[in-house]
Image: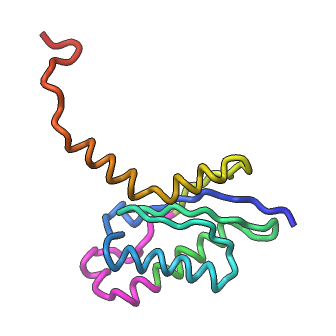
Amino acid sequence: METTVYHIWFATKHRAWLLQGDIERAARDSICLVAKERRIQLLECETAVDHVHLLLRLGENESLPKVMSLLKGVSSYRLHCGFPELKLDSGLERFWQRGYGFRVVEPGSLAMRRRYVRTQKERLDSFEERSTMPRPSGRGIGHQ
């Protein structure tokens, strides 16, 4: 049977920074559990503070829109059940933003995509460190 690997990303509603601490762990665990329960081949799952990256391997008879609706819908429901205060604190009825982005992963680039997904937090930390560094005191182009 022919399969396709997809790199998928989706965000929390309004890109709220909800994926931290217990909620982050519960979100990742919920997505992984739903995939296992429904026999969806989840190769990788990693979160950043406001979005998730997945690598999924789907067979020719599996529909990416249906799989994503299931993963996002069930995980959102479980998160709201597990953290009832989440709706009140965030003011959001839905945990995930509508839609998702995706790319088909070419067979030769699977290892690179796995590394990209696995290193989400490291790259975010590195970006935050760079963005808080003091800027050089020299003048920029066009300043006199």
Q: Residue 108: x percent and y percent? A: 72, 47
85 drawn magenta: yes
User: Residue 109, relative to residue 89: is it above or below?
Assistant: above
- Residue 51: % across, % down: 43, 62
Residue 71, placed above or below residue 142 = below
Give the vertical position of 81 relative to 123 (above or below).
below
Identified at 12% across, 9% down, the residue is 144
Give me the residue at 72% from left, 68% from top: 63
> On the rendered structure, is 49 left or right of 45?
left
Quadrant placement of the N terminus: bottom right
> Residue 22 sits in which quadrant?
bottom left
**Residue at 44%, 56% in the rendered image:** 120
Q: Please state which of residues 32 and 10 is positioned toward the viewer in this rendering.
A: 32
Residue 6 place in picture, x, y as percent? 66, 58
Which segment is the magenta one?
78-98
**28, 77: nearer the viewer:** 28
Numbered-mark total: 0
Q: Is residue 79 magenta?
A: yes
In this rendering, position of residue 27 left or right of residue 17: right
Give the color scheme: rainbow, by chain, secondary structure or one colour. rainbow
Look at 39% across and 55% down and name the residue there: 122
Give 111 or 23, whichever is nearer the viewer.
Answer: 111
Can you give x and y, in whole percent of width and height, for residue 21 in the image? 31, 75
